[in-house]
Amino acid sequence: MNAPTPLVELLGASWTAPASVMAAAWNVEGSHAGFTLSDGTLALASGKWDGGPQLKPHETRGVELIKAAAPPPPLARVAVHDGVSLDFAADPDGGFLSAGDDGRLVQVDIEGNAREAATYPGRWIDHVATSRSGLRACASGRLVRLLGPTENELTLPASSTALMFSASGQQLAIAHAGGVTLWDTRSSSSRLLACAGLPCALAWSPDGRYLVSGLQANALHGWRLPDGDDIELGGYALQPGSLSFSADGRVLVTNGGMRAVCWRFDPPGADDRPRECGVAGSAPVSVVACHPSLSMIAVGYHSGAVLLCQPGGADVLFVRANGGAPVSALAWAPDGGRLAYGTEAGEIALVYLPHALFRISDPQ
């Protein structure tokens, strides 16, 4: 039996860049995806083009695939950093923000125009984070700067390892050795959420009740913020460095194994066993990304495969088949209608995935 055709070949567009993909993000309007590359450039891809693939309603089959009648436009590339981009995010005013090891935070619009948003001469800008409320923050070592009409700075007890705003933008979580510092963006007060080890990745639940960190020591440590309770989740074979909450906040999905690991968060329990989804192959999961509205996960593998599955579900849809370099970046468009991915070999792709394509049940 022949394997189903991967969705990228039916509903996608792909390009090859001359350097590894470091990160991917969509602009807030969802019209363009940006990919930072290891040579210090930014690649820009348009999410739609004249003659691109379409799905149309069909009387008997539900939907009908209209294949692309024209190739996508070429990637636009912008020189952004003298070195490499260390972090990347959508800018709330449009376009993108890239933090580099040349000490520059650079804002790039979808036309490829670049300007300096902040600079730390002689230092690296390790992290950048943005919120839908319009806030921006960047970190260089122990120094974190809140950018905007009223700028502010915070000095940490140790160098930052990750940076993430809550969905409301009212709190900024900053990971570092010994725990996570919560910075209130309204009052400028801060408090430490302590944990043993080194947190290297962060995820907020959509309602802001839970904050979870992926530890260097192959485990998760989280906090239920209303009462300050700690949450310990372990059993990983590998470091969980990619964390993503489902849109309803009921499930936290991570890498760190041969399949995507799904933890229940309604509420979490230290004795609960996680469920897994996706396909277990010869290579572990490299990155995960939950759909912004549906109960669905995009899963990238070190084998080069990209697939879609549901939390705890057995069925999968292959976006990209096995073979090639590890998947290094995944990003959903804000409306969930397109998925961007990139690999360590410089493969870049956008896949059209309208909601009409899926019949979503609730396996949770």
Image (cartoon, rainbow, N blue to C red):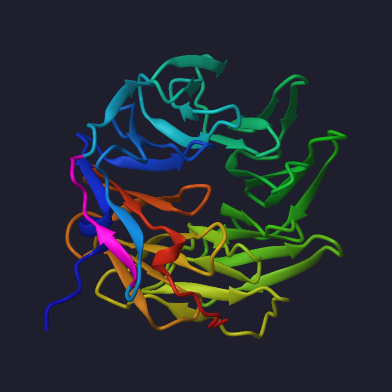
- Identified at 27% across, 69% down, the residue is 283
> Residue at horizontal 55%, vertical 57%?
292
Q: Which residues are magenta?
A: 62-71
Residue placed most toward the observer, 176 or 183: 183
Q: Quadrant of residue 314?
A: bottom left
Q: Residue visible at 44% across and 16% down?
A: 114
Picture coordinates of residue 71, whole percent (x, y) = 18, 40
Q: Quadrant of the N terminus?
A: bottom left
Instruction: Work out whether residue 257 can be spotted.
Output: yes
Residue found at x 75% / y 19%? 149
Say if the magenta span includes residue 63: yes
Q: As drawn, which residue projects farthest toward the left?
A: 1
x, y percent for residue 335: 52, 50
**Where's residue 334, x and y in %?**
53, 47
Q: Residue furthest front?
A: 59
Q: Position of residue 78 (x, y in %)?
A: 33, 22
Q: Quadrant of residue 42?
A: top left
202 sits to left or right of 84: right
**Visible residue check, residue 255:** no
Q: Quadrant of the C terminus?
A: bottom right
Task: Specify the quadrant of the image occupied by residue 80.
Answer: top left
